[in-house]
Amino acid sequence: MIGFLDSLLVTVRTALRRPVTAQYPDPSKRQPVAEGFMGFPALTWDEDVREPYCTGCMVCVRDCPTQCMSAVMDDNPKHAEGASRRRKIVREFEINLGRCILCGICVDVCNFDAIEMSHEHELSKYERNGNRVDLTRLLEMGRAYQRETGWGPSQPKKNSGVPVEKPAGEREKSAGGAAGR
Amino acid sequence: MQFQQQPAQQADSLDLMVNMGPQHPSTHGVFRLVIWIDGERIVRAEPHIGYLHRGSEKLCEGEQYGQIITLFDRLDYVSNLNCELAFCLTVEKLMGLEVPDRASCIRVVLCELNRIASHMLFYGVFGLDAGAMTPILYGFRERERVQSLFERVTGARMMHNYIRVGGVKEDLPSDFAERLGELTALLRAGIDECDELLTNNELFLSRTKGVGAIGGSEGVDYGLSGPSLRAAGVAEDVRVSEPYSIYDRFDYGIPVGTYGDCFDRYYVRMEEMRQSLRIVDQAMEQMEPGPVSAKVRRIARPPKGEAYLRTESPRGDFGVYLVSDGSDKPYRVKVRAPSFANLQALQRLLRGAYVADAVVILGSIDIVLGEVDR
Ligand code: SF4
Ligand code: SF4
């Protein structure tokens, strides 16, 4: 009997507490995601030269455990004009977010700071393949993430697309496949 | 189906066959239990598994070592970090890799927190199995706290992919020690509150005491491990008997039960959470600044050979057997899943029990179907 009262006491104590459960879509009660939260991957945007960081090198595509991405590489017209340091640029990029398992491997392997785990995590569609997102959408997600967190590349010197004046003879490094981290 | 072909001498034709699951709320996943009852007593029980089979072991053969960690996340999806740890330790053993001290400390802290989160889930659903509605709310509250910290550290609440071959993915956030301090204080109070809420409740006691008892030696024969075995009085814990990582550096107790019944299995876990908190505190004290990952190539290529390593997951003895052919993908991965082995004892535990206790007994061995079916 004592034990029974014991547990009843806990119940009474908490009965006087304010409720902690909130109805889901209520925006005022939304829990913010933690800093460093891994949502769906998104492509980052280089504001200085107005192009994506991504060169379409396909390293992430090959290392993705669920094979949910695809990318197509193209010559960068801006490089030809001398406006960008990136020799190659991504033309098409697709991620099937319905298949993505949010593992973050693509971010780890990318040498160009071109892909980040955004804070986007609420996606639902009526079709099974409704979450295939293309380059435009990925860049939108990425820009939203960049604005939200003030993101900057982890290796700005190496990965920025801003052309630099270099003494003649020095090899252009940024667009080549750099060594892994 | 197999159960229809069973000869009549085991189950009398007068016995009633009752089918529980696979879509049954108290089977903790998709698990089917067929029981034959004679009046109120269970004559025979037969677990049917495989509804969550994803072929993880086979999938491992087609993935690189770094990618396999994501598959291990999804084995025991209630204690992901413990599974990751087991796999990474096995690869490191095969490669002869030395893990930096800080990385080991981080791993231990997070794995023990994960153990608490896992046992808190057990606490909640076990209360539910025994007919108490509220414990699940308390259990989930504590689990939620742990998961919020995980979200901050690893970026994900459940499928972390944080422990990597050679160390961990990245260093802890700067406010980690502070937040962990708050968390452990809350957890200490929370565990006591949960304990108070359920443990001495007469109804709960009469539902669990003396129900589904199994002796120590019989438990060993059935291959039980983890809290389910320790409840039967066998002080076997891989962390102590075969220390892995840096578990030999800590001072903690191994809670052991006496009767091996459902209540002991429940209470051993409650005590284990308190011991886990002790380990967390000690590991935090021993943590020094330093690198969090050994120097490894991004694509690990262990030398030709094989390795087996046991770890103590919240459910028991979690072993990984790994055969490498020297390439970037393993030749064979075999998982010794504690839930699967513990499930073997279910038939024995259920025989002669009341139908109403079937769910309590099943809940008390705390299976996770992701690990049973793999
Ligand atoms: S690895 Fe980086 S640069 Fe290469 S395709 Fe992927 S996102 Fe683009
Ligand atoms: S997060 Fe993982 S699953 Fe998703 S796209 Fe990146 S590598 Fe693939």
Image (spheres, rainbow, N blue to C red):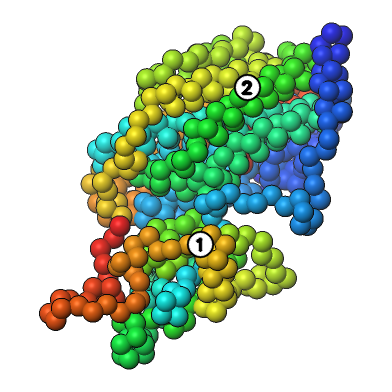
Query: For residue A9, which quarter of the picture?
Result: top right
Mark 1 lies on residue: A150
As drawn, is B215 to the left or to the right of B129? left
Q: Residue B136 falls in which quadrant of the image?
A: top right
State the image coordinates of residue B163 (x, y, percent, origin top left). Answer: 42, 43
* Residue that appears at 83% across and 38% down: A19
Q: Quadrant of residue B357?
A: top right
Q: Amino acid at mark 2?
A: Arg
Q: Is residue B40 left or right of residue B89?
A: right
Which residue position holds label 2?
Answer: B188
Instruction: Tell me which chain the residue with mark 1 is part of.
Output: A
Q: Are marks 1 and 2 in contact (CB under 8 Å)?
A: no
Q: Nearer the viewer, residue A46 or B77?
A: A46
What secondary structure is found at the residue carrying circle 1? Answer: loop
- Residue A143 visible in rendering: yes
Against B39, residue A68 (above or below) is below
In front of the other: B332 or B235: B235
Q: Which quarter of the rendered image does ligand 1 occupy?
A: bottom left
Residue B44 against residue A137 in the figure, above or below: above
Q: Residue at x 70, y 35 (%)?
A: B140
The secondary element bearing badge 2 is classed as helix
Q: Nearer the viewer, residue B105 or B300?
A: B105
